[in-house]
Image (tube, grey):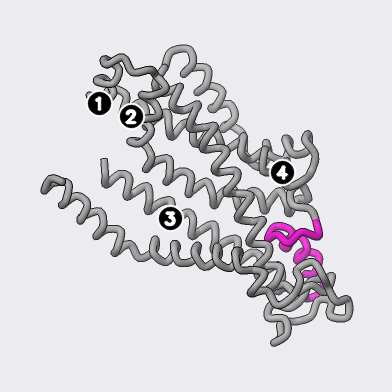
């Protein structure tokens, strides 16, 4: 490794170490993921079983965050709800990254008519609010978890595609790409073996940002009755249930679900910004 490369790595490492907000956000995400994974061990109650004698109970030693309108423990539902609330966005991000990445690579490298048709299609999709389009798609498909996940995966693909296309346009004229082309390598090999590894940082940054937005929109669809259906534990479902308890003076469920959603989304946004800065520092 050359001296310049060593200096660069040390400089980037130093910036990452002193990036306090990113470190805190990363710790928060790890705690939330761990809580979701260990929910069966941590949760004191079954998230789907309630006690009607303890309906809308206030926070206590027995129920840290109280109970909901069906007498179910709010804390247990928060832990189990993290599973559906995190797995859904993860599937959306992976699917949209694969689809959008493939389209962006082709559009940026091939150019011409293909690039024009794809970019205009992306512009058309992105000109509408994603949540509104998601509502229309889910309403056409039918309410449910997988319908909401599929709709959001489709709608988030153009975002990744534009990021990838922009990165490819900045790389395709560089010597290493020209050398691969002159050696007669097929297009697929140039895209996968040469271009893709050099545009991972912006893809990772955008995918991390998209995770938070997907979580928020999936919770919104569930709140509207188009996503996760009861009695499955889910943060969006808890918002919907908590709203019905507000007239009775029970605020714990709605507040708890709102706080964990906001904290999780903000944490992923901070991590995405940190990855974007890290990617720019490498260029």
Between the C-alphas of marks 3 and 1, the distance is: 31 Å
Q: Residues within 10 Å of mark 2 (few under 14, many from 20)?
A: some
Between the C-alphas of marks 4 and 2, the distance is: 35 Å
Residue 273: numbered disc: none
Span shown in magenta: 230-251
The residue at 12%/45% (across/down) is 2
The residue at 78%/38% (across/down) is 139
Q: Secondary structure at mark 1?
A: helix
Q: Residues within 10 Å of mark 3 (few under 14, many from 20)?
A: many
The residue at 52%/17% (across/down) is 117
Pinpoint residue 17: horizontal percent, then vertical percent.
29, 63
Q: Which is more toward the observer, 39 or 82?
A: 39
The disc, 4 or 2, on the residue closer to the chain's N-terminal end is 4
Residue 146: numbered disc: 4
The disc, 4 or 3, on the residue closer to the chain's N-terminal end is 4
- Dots 1 and 4: beta carbons under 8 Å? no
Residue on which disc 1 sits: 176
Residue on which disc 2 sits: 194
> Image quarter for residue 188?
top left
- Dots 1 and 2: beta carbons under 8 Å? yes
Q: Residues within 10 Å of mark 1 (few under 14, many from 20)?
A: some
Q: Residue furthest bottom?
A: 61
Residue on which disc 3 sits: 271
């Amino acid at each position: 490794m050359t001296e310049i490369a060593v200096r660069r790595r040390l400089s980037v490492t130093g910036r990452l170490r002193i990036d306090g907000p990113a470190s805190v956000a990363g710790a928060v995400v790890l705690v939330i993921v761990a809580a979701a994974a260990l929910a069966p061990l941590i949760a004191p109650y079954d998230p789907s079983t309630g006690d009607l004698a303890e309906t809308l109970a206030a926070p206590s030693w027995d129920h840290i965050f109280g109970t909901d309108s069906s007498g179910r423990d709010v804390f247990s539902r928060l832990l189990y709800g993290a599973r559906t609330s995190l797995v859904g966005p993860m599937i959306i991000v992976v699917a949209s990254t694969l689809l959008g990445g493939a389209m962006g690579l082709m559009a940026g490298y091939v150019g011409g008519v293909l690039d024009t048709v794809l970019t205009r299609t992306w512009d058309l999709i992105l000109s509408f609010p994603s949540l509104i389009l998601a509502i229309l798609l889910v309403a056409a498909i039918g309410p449910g978890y997988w319908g909401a996940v599929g709709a959001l995966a489709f709608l988030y693909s153009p975002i990744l595609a534009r990021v990838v296309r922009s990165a490819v346009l900045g790389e395709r004229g560089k010597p290493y790409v020209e050398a691969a082309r002159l050696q007669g390598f097929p297009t697929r090999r140039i895209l996968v073996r040469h271009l893709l590894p050099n545009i991972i940082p912006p893809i990772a940054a955008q995918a991390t940002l998209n995770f938070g937005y997907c979580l928020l929109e999936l919770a919104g669809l569930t709140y509207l009755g188009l996503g996760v259906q009861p009695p499955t534990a889910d943060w969006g479902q808890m918002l919907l249930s908590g709203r019905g308890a507000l007239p009775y003076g029970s605020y714990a469920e709605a507040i708890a679900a709102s706080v964990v959603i906001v904290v999780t989304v903000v944490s992923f946004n901070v991590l995405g910004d940190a990855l974007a800065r890290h990617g720019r520092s490498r260029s």
